[in-house]
């Protein structure tokens, strides 16, 4: 009898086929329980609580028109003054002496004018009778004109001297409150140098300090709700009218001014306030932090097909990170099902089972 030799690979193949035929079926994939949320587009607001203070809408710097040494400065910071009230005085010695000299010059010019006019009258009468020449009349006329001009100059110098003496007394240009004092008695000040600063009565404004961010210009014309830091007193309102062009180097904030409503009682100057404002920043889809994963180094989220309940990884563009979650600007369609919890256990095509769906 002839024997046929079996080749080496045939035996393992036959054995594997037999084992496969009798192997039990593999169990089906168990869906992973995940929490789902529905992505909806909604307006996005940034909530601000800002600190600041109440200031006068118009601050008036007050100083002497002429320089000199201050001999009296009775008002203090916080004092209320009325229009025309004396605020400070300069040493009037030099101004008084200049006034006496100017008055003497004016009296002399007036006397010279009287003599010149009398001479002109006589010359005119003599010329009319033929007892004087026309040249004498012309000379008398010229002398009278020169005397009148000299008197006008003397009167102008006298008025200036009187004003200089009056300028030694500094008066309040308007009613208000003294907010700053920049000089002291005995100090020599120059012309127009600020001695006091007055907060004029009337309009008030809220001065706030805002963190610098790209959408800062959206504060303009916004209505802001104000309340005192102590929590007592009526709620106030202001409309943002001014945004400083530069960031404060010490605090990194931007100064913002808001005009107070004039039909409401004006709060006290320097009142510390807290401002509350919700600033709109367009619209986005808000999702919880736990939905965020990465794909190729960028942000992404897992979405679930509502029919097959299979997971798909989708890259997204995030417009803003908040303390509550993320705002997705692009990458998701309205109403998409997004995995909020359990995203770290997923892979493409993984079957899921929703445990809770937030509408």
Image (spheres, helix red, strand yellow):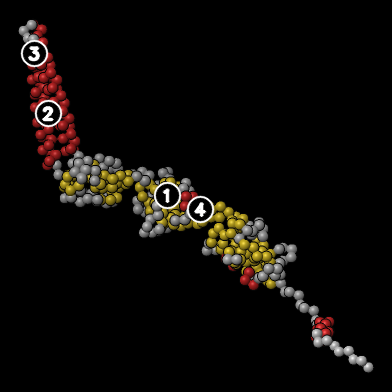
Q: Nearer the viewer, mark 3 or mark 2?
A: 3
- State whether residue 125 appears in this view: no
Q: Nearer the viewer, mark 4 or mark 3?
A: 3
Tag 3 residue = 136
Q: Position of residue 252 (x, y in %)?
A: 40, 58
| Element class at badge 4 | strand
**Alpha carbons under labels 4 and 3: distance apart:** 89 Å
Displayed quadrant of residue 113: top left
**Alpha carbons under labels 4 and 1: distance apart:** 15 Å
Q: Position of residue 124 (x, y in %)?
A: 10, 11
- Labels 1 and 2 touching (C-beta < 8 A): no
**Alpha carbons under labels 1 and 2: distance apart:** 56 Å
- Labels 3 and 2 touching (C-beta < 8 A): no
Of marks 3 and 2, which one's residue comes earlier in the chain?
Answer: 2
Which one is in front, 75 or 222? 222
Tag 2 residue = 106
Residue positioned 27% across, 43% down in the render: 82
């Amino acid at each position: 009898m002839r024997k046929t030799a079996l080749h080496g690979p045939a035996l393992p193949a036959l054995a594997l086929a037999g084992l496969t035929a009798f192997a039990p079926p593999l169990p089906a994939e168990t869906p992973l329980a995940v929490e789902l949320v529905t992505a909806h587009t909604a307006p996005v607001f940034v909530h601000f609580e800002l600190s600041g203070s109440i200031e006068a809408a118009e601050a008036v710097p007050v100083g002497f028109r002429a320089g000199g040494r201050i001999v009296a400065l009775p008002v203090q910071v916080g004092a209320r003054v009325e229009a025309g009230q004396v605020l400070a005085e300069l040493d009037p010695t030099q101004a008084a002496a200049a006034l006496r000299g100017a008055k003497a010059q004016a009296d002399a010019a007036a006397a010279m004018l009287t003599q010149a006019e009398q001479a002109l009258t006589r010359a005119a009468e003599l010329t009319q009778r033929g007892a004087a020449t026309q040249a004498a009349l012309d000379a008398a006329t010229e002398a009278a004109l020169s005397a009148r001009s000299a008197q006008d100059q003397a009167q102008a110098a006298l008025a200036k001297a009187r004003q200089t003496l009056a300028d030694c007394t500094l008066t309040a240009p308007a009613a208000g409150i003294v907010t700053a004092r920049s000089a002291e008695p005995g100090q020599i000040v120059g012309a127009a140098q600020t001695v006091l600063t007055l907060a004029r009565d009337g309009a008030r404004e809220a001065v706030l300090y805002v963190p610098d961010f790209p959408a800062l210009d959206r504060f303009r014309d916004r209505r802001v709700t104000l309340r005192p830091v102590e929590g007592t007193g009526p709620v106030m309102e202001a409309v943002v009218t001014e945004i400083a062009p530069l960031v404060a180097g010490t605090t990194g904030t931007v100064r913002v001014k808001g005009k107070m409503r004039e039909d409401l009682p004006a709060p006290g100057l320097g009142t510390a306030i807290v401002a509350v404002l919700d600033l709109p920043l367009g619209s986005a889809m808000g999702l919880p932090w736990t939905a965020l994963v990465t794909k190729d180094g960028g942000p992404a989220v897992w979405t679930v097909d509502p029919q097959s309940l299979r997971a798909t990884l989708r890259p997204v563009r995030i417009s803003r990170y908040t303390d509550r979650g993320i705002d997705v600007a692009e990458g998701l369609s309205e109403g998409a099902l997004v995995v909020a919890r359990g995203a770290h256990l997923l892979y493409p095509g993984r079957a899921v089972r929703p445990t809770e769906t937030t509408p």
